[in-house]
Image (cartoon, rainbow, N blue to C red):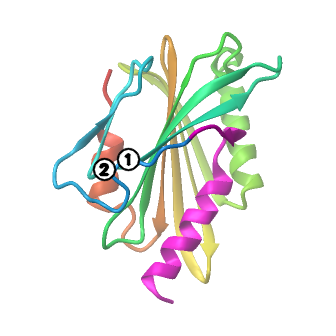
Amino acid sequence: MKLSNIKGLLFLSMLVFSWLVCSGAGGRAVGQGEQAEKQVKFNPSGSEFSVLFPGQPVVKTMKMKEENGSRNRVVRAELQLEHDPYFIRAEFTPRLSYSMEILGDEALKETAHRYAALEGLQNIQVSVETGKLGKQVTTRGFKNVGGIQCTFEVVTYYGRVSILVLYAGGPSIGYPPQQVERFFGSVSK
């Protein structure tokens, strides 16, 4: 299977795996088709978190419908890694008064596991820890995409005023590449 086909299938699979129920609202592409040689900081207004991309991501602003009918802003930055069949994504949303983490670690684990299973991931691993960046939920699972075994990973950070969700995925052979490791390791407050 061609590298471009793998990238397309991975991208489509991860779009489905997005945990936020969003509808488009005036998305804008930033530097689409260009790859910067330096790290690009993603730190949307209102977020206490930042993360570094290994190139210029495509950034979109969307709205997330809440249970009470209101709509909150979600900012997504995504980058298909050049010359590799891997992608990385970050999503920011303001922390809501009824965010999942108030339900406790077991509820977070169960919810993350349920979403991953609904997206067809297998051998799902979920961990919850609290560190210097706040509460962190890490989900990892595997899925066959177009005949290729792939690894998908999601790390959610619950801060005082915002939530940052990081996504990555690609063929399991060679996962995670250095760019994905650096991406996950670049989160700061």
x and y percent of residue 36 in the render?
A: 21, 54
Verify CB contact (< 8 Å) between mark 2 and mark 1.
Answer: yes
Q: Which numbered disc covers residue 4?
A: none
Relative image position of residue 22 (x, y in whole percent): 69, 39
Q: Disc 2 marks which amino acid? A: Gln
Which residue is located at x 75 percent, y 44 percent?
Answer: 114
Which one is earlier in the sequence, the residue at label 2 or at label 1? 1
Q: Nearer the viewer, residue 100 or 31?
A: 31
**Is 7 within the magenta?**
yes
Q: Residue furthest right?
A: 68
Q: Is 47 situated above or below 151?
A: above
Q: Are there few (<14), some (14-19), or many (20+) residues within 10 Å of tag 1?
A: few
Query: Along the line of sight, which residue is nearer the eye, 8 or 24?
Result: 24
Name the residue furthest left: 38
What residue sits right under mark 2 in the picture? 56
Residue 112, picture quadrant: top right
User: Please, what secondary structure does the residue beneath circle 2 have?
Assistant: loop
Q: Tell me the element at label 1.
A: loop
What range is drawn magenta here? 1-26
Tell me the residue at 30%/50% (across/down): 56
Q: CA distance from mark 2 to mark 1?
A: 7 Å
Q: Nearer the viewer, mark 2 or mark 1?
A: 1
Residue annotated with mark 1: 30
116 left or right of 187? right
Q: Residues within 10 Å of mark 2 (few under 14, many from 20)?
A: many
Q: Left or right: where does residue 25 sit relative to residue 185?
A: right
Q: Residue shown at 54%/72% (left/top)?
A: 8
